Structures are given as structure tokens and as C-alpha cells.
Image (spheres, helix red, strand yellow):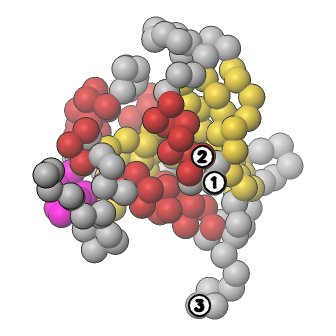
Amino acid sequence: GVMAVPRATDRDVQFGDLTEKNIGQLRVLNEALYPVKYQDKFYKDVLTQGEFAQYVYYRDLLVGAICARVEPQEDGSFKLYILTLGVLEPYRRLGIGALMVDYIMGKAAEQPDVKEVYLHVQVGNEAAVNFYRSKGFEEGETVENYYKNIEPTAAVIFRKQNTPATAKGV
């Protein structure tokens, strides 16, 4: 039979910063992962997001990235928006994506002013829909004509309330 690949654990997966020097790797990853072309502004923005925008390494190999940004709200609170979350094809279904969501929710939990984490999923992307559902995200409204150059153009919003961590060390 086919060799079962063991699930990735925290020992197998590390996160690393995006920097001016290595940002080119994110361009290459994104071109491999997404049908959308990201503009220079995207790369400038994610460089300012610190621990919310990270490369993901599996056993020291760069296999993906998660890019999120903090968005101030009118009431003084914040939302965390996941721009991209992707893992290269050969490394999918090992649980790496789940660890990436756990990572970003953990970072959000350290920020009590962050009220929710949210993202857009292209309509028809059942794999992504099932993945985010399995991670406790709730399906929200559909946004028509969200994507410019890919079909279908509609996106569904998925959101998850942030549960801030209690006092440190508890």
C-alpha cells in the first residue's frame, strides 16, 4: 500500500520572518500557490506585519507562508485579516495548514483588542471551505465580484471570534 506520511507536529514545523532580503521567496511561493497575481503593494504591506506574516518550514524546507494584517476598526478594536495561507502541493494533508491556523489564532489571542480573524474563500473552493470549517471558522456572507481576473469571481467570508489568552503564564 501507499506509505502513510505521519502528521506534522510542532517539532517538524517552524515559522520564520519575512525580510527585505528574503521577500523574493514569497513571490515565488505565491506564484506557485495562487491564481491571483499580487502587486508590489502586497509585498510592501506584509513586510510591516511582523509575526502576523511568516514563512512556514517543514523539516527546514520552505513549504508555505501565512500572511495576515491587523485592521483597525472604528470602535478602536482590531480585526486580523488573513490575506494568504498556503502550503505547496507535496506537503499538503500533513496538518501543516492546521498548525498555521493555530499559530495565527495564538498570535491573535495575545492581542485582546483583536476581536476576530477573518478571510475570503473563492466560491467553489470546497477544499478551503471544508478546511476553515474544520478549524472552527463560520461561513458569512458572499461577496460578488471580489476577484477581478479569476472565475468564479465571488468570495465567501469566513470568520472566527478571537478568544484572548488570560494572564500570561496561566
Query: Callout 1: helix, strand or loop?
Result: loop
Between 131 and 43, the residue placed more toward the observer is 131
Is the C-beta separation of discs 2 and 1 under 8 Å? yes
Q: Secondary structure at mark 3?
A: loop
Gap between marks 3 and 2 measured at Cα: 30 Å
Please give the residue where the numbered disc 1 appears in the rendered image. 136
**Mark 2 to mark 1 CA distance (whole Å):** 5 Å
Residue 109, position as x, y percentages in the image:
63, 67
Earlier in the chain: of badge 3 and badge 2, it is 2
Task: Check the image and report above or below for 2 versus 9.
Answer: above
What amino acid is found at the position of numbered circle 2 in the picture? Arg
Q: Residue at x 77, y 45 (%)?
A: 73
Quadrant where the C terminus is found in the figure: bottom right
Type of amino acid at the residue the image marks with label 3: Gly
Query: From where the camera sits, is residue 77 visible?
Result: yes
- Contact, mark 1 vs mark 3 (Cβ under 8 Å): no
Residue type at mark 1: give it. Gly
Instruction: Please give the residue where the numbered disc 2 appears in the rendered image.
Output: 133
Instruction: Answer with left or right where residue 99 lies relative to residue 121.
Output: left
Q: Which mark is residue 169?
A: 3
Nearest the camera: 37 or 22? 37
Q: Is residue 57 magenta?
A: yes
Q: Which residues are magenta?
A: 56-62
Crowd class of label 2 (few under 14; some 14 to 19; many from 20; radius 10 Å) = some
